[in-house]
Every structure is written in C-alpha cells, then in structure tokens.
Amino acid sequence: MEDDNCVMKIGTLRAHFTGYQPEKRATQEFCEDIPELGRAIIVIDYVSAALRQYEVEFRVLEDVNDLRSGGRYEDLGSEADIEAATLVHVPFQVYPRGTLTFEHNFETPGWYIGMITAKDPETGTVLHSVFPFKVGVHSLWRYLPAFLIVFAIAALVYRLTGRKNNSTEVK
C-alpha cells in the first residue's frame, strides 16, 4: 500500500483513486493519468476508515497556472481562484460507505488538478489533498520499445542480406 501510486494522502488519512473509461478502455483501470479524451468514471475509496465520518468535497480544476506535476494546494491561489478554475465540483458530503464516485467528460487534452477537501467533524480541522494528472496526453516514450524492436530487426535483415565486402575476394 505504501508504494501504491493510486493512494492519495489527505493529512494522515488515505484514499484510493481509480478511474475508468468504459467506452474507450473497457474495464481497464487507471490511477495516475486519464489516457483518452471523453467520459471518465472516477472512484475514490477510503483506505482510512476515519474518513467515513468526515465531510468530503472533491473538485477537478483546470491547471490555469501551468503547475503541471508540481501543483500543490498552496499554488492554487485564493478560494475565488479555485472556484474559477473548477470544472467538476462534488459538494461536501459524508460518505459512510467510504466511496465517492462521479463522471466527467474530458474534452481538452492537458493537465488538470484533482483536489479533495475533508473536514474533521470533531475538531473542524480542514485537510486538503491535491494531485495533478494529465488527460489525453500520450508520451512518445511509450513507443520507444516498438521502435527499438523494428530497428533491430531491420539491422539484422540488412546484415544477413547485405552485399559482401569485395575487398577480401581474390581475383
């Protein structure tokens, strides 16, 4: 669980983020970036049972400040700035079963910021968790293994079928 990239920390509490794109990726799960544009179903499951008592709010923000992967809560600006950048807002609510689910249709590729805010019912303490993610942005690095395989096969075929060096032949 400690090495799980899908686990978000909300103060000392934890939740697990999972996304789906049924029309594009069938039942494939993702937790860091959303691979394709279009409808995405996001599921947040509480790992920490204490979160079931908290009021929790969730937002998806446009990365208007170009924070990319380095975005932190402190970088988001004022409450008005956060409100202005909000694309999805799931208002504060207690989730006694420990699961928050919503859908959003992502139409523009780029960076977005997910934000969970949790209020402790006993102390009134407010905790924030911010996690930047990309939507519909494909890295060319994922094609590198295929390119290397094709290059190696081409080099092998050239070597096996290439012309022989005529300088070693006796005339």
Image (cartoon, rainbow, N blue to C red):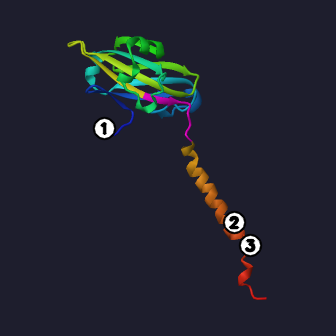
Instruction: Name the amino acid type tagged 1.
Output: Glu
**Which of the two residues, 2 or 72, is positioned nearer the viewer here?**
72
Residue 152 image position (x, y, % from top left)? 61, 60
Numbered disc 3: secondary structure: loop
Mark sitting on residue 2: 1
Report crowding for label 2: few under 14, some 14 to 19, many 20 or more residues within 10 A (C-alpha).
few
Numbered disc 2: secondary structure: helix
**Which of the two residues, 161 or 128, is positioned nearer the viewer here?**
128
Mark 3 sits on what residue? 163
Report crowding for label 3: few under 14, some 14 to 19, many 20 or more residues within 10 A (C-alpha).
few
Task: Classify the position of the N terminus by image quarter.
Answer: top left
Residue 69 image position (x, y, % from top left)? 43, 32
Q: Earlier in the sequence, mark 1 or mark 3?
A: 1
Residue 87 image position (x, y, % from top left)? 49, 16
Q: Which segment is the magenta one?
A: 132-139
Mark sitting on residue 158: 2
Instruction: Name the amino acid type tagged 2.
Output: Tyr
Where 23 sits versus 165, above or below? above
